[in-house]
Amino acid sequence: MEIKEIIKNKKFKNVAVTILEILVVAGIIFGGLMFARSKVSQEADKAAKNNVKDVKEQETKENEKADKYYIEVNQRKNIVIIYQYSKDEKSREQIKAFQSCVGKEVPRGTFKTGRKYTWLDIYQGWHKYNTELGNGVWIQSAVYKDKNDYSLSKASYNSLGKSKAEGKSILLSAKDAAWIYEHCKEGTKVSVIKGRKNDELSVSPEAKVSTYKYCGWDPTDPDKNNPYLKIKNGAVVKGLSTITTERGQEPDYLGNIIALNKKGKVITNRLKYNTIDYSTAGTYKVNYSYKAKDGIRYKISQKIKVQDTTPPKVTTGKSLYTLEVDSDSTDVLNTEKTVKAIVDMVKADVRTDESVKDIQVYTLEKEQFRVDEKAAVVIKAEDLYGNIGSHQVMCEFKVKEEETTLPKGAIEAKKHKKKTKPKTFEEDTTEKKSNRKTSE
């Protein structure tokens, strides 16, 4: 049988159709199975991801609990104790103790940590790594003379653990203040207690690190620029690459530098260096050098930036100025002419303690002037470095007194009236006798 005849055969056609239907059904079933398998895989992956997420969230919560601290300030012992809670928060243990100086005005009680500032000017000086406890109480570093890392007050630093601080400060070394600043989250509980002399500590505070002469850094400061972290025998090291000073103020040439000989002895004061003109703003280079007896030469350089950040001091001859006006009418007072008169009067009396490039005077209530009220006048002066100083005075208004008018004849009589001296007793008697003889 030929192929054409086979194809035309009815039985063959039926078999072919049946096979085709079987293949279609098989394809549908296979596709359905693959889709179901894919769906199951997606759900499995999703469930796995959720499980990982749940595990991570649980770990995070546990870590948060593990990092939860409690701070106790013992006034009697001048010690700040750090406790860490267990994961279930049912117990806590001492993990650190810091030598401190507790301020005389720090109240006892319970606080919570709040705002944080790297630098803060409060209670007789600047401080680093500041953590607020509320009610004006701060945990912070020892005192700095100004906002410079190399301006530490060594008297304040050396008093840690020994005496009381001023105000509401709880002073610590830079290292310890930085630890609280970085590790204790906002809301950490802090208790200030009176304490007793025989209070026992599970952890003793670290011994105080001594400072080198001339260097103005806190030796414990974790700042990467701290020269105490770079020192080595037989070398000169510096902290910041550029230090600053205010115009007109001599810079601390040695405060940012530590020099040690091969035996570890401080030789910073033996360095010779060029001085700069600190009366003029700008950036200057200072070179330091010293040749020891053993032939070793020590040298280093640093930049000093002289800047002017101090606003000019603005003063006036008096604090209250009086402007005479023609009328007490508000229509007369509240005019540009009146404002200009006030500005000119005050501006003519402004004084500054340095050269300035601009002085502005303006009133705060130029549309509400009243004869029976005083108006505020503000003066602002900008110096050559962009600093702005301000001052405020008051201005009052006084209506001019009107001159009394007289008739024209009375005015002329008044002008030509001669002044006569009072007569003496002898002149009066002689005149009376002369008048008597004439009448006779």
Image: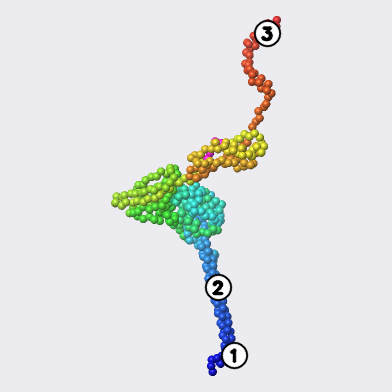
Q: In this view, does 264 lie to the left or right of 326?
A: left
- Write down the quadrant of residue 112 in the picture: bottom right
Viewer-nearest of discs 3 and 2: 2
Looking at this view, is 128 or 402 the one in front?
402
Is residue 276 at all visible to an observer of this figure? yes
Q: Residue 46 carries which label?
A: 2
Q: What residue type is labelled 1?
A: Asn
Badge 3 element: helix
Q: In this view, does 192 lie to the left or right of 223?
A: right
**44 or 424: nearer the eye?**
44
Say which residue label 1 marks.
Answer: 14
Circle 1: element type? helix
Residue 278 position within the rendered picture, expressed as x and y whole percent measured from the top left: 42, 44
Q: Earlier in the sequence, mark 3 or mark 2?
A: 2
Q: Distance between the residues labelled 3 and 2?
A: 141 Å
- Which quarter of the figure is the N terminus placed in? bottom right
Can I make out residue 254 in this image?
A: no
| Residue 350 highlighted magenta (yes or no) | no
Give the label, 2 or 1, closer to the camera: 1
> Which span of residues is magenta-colored?
314-318
Dot 2 falls on a residue whose secondary structure is helix
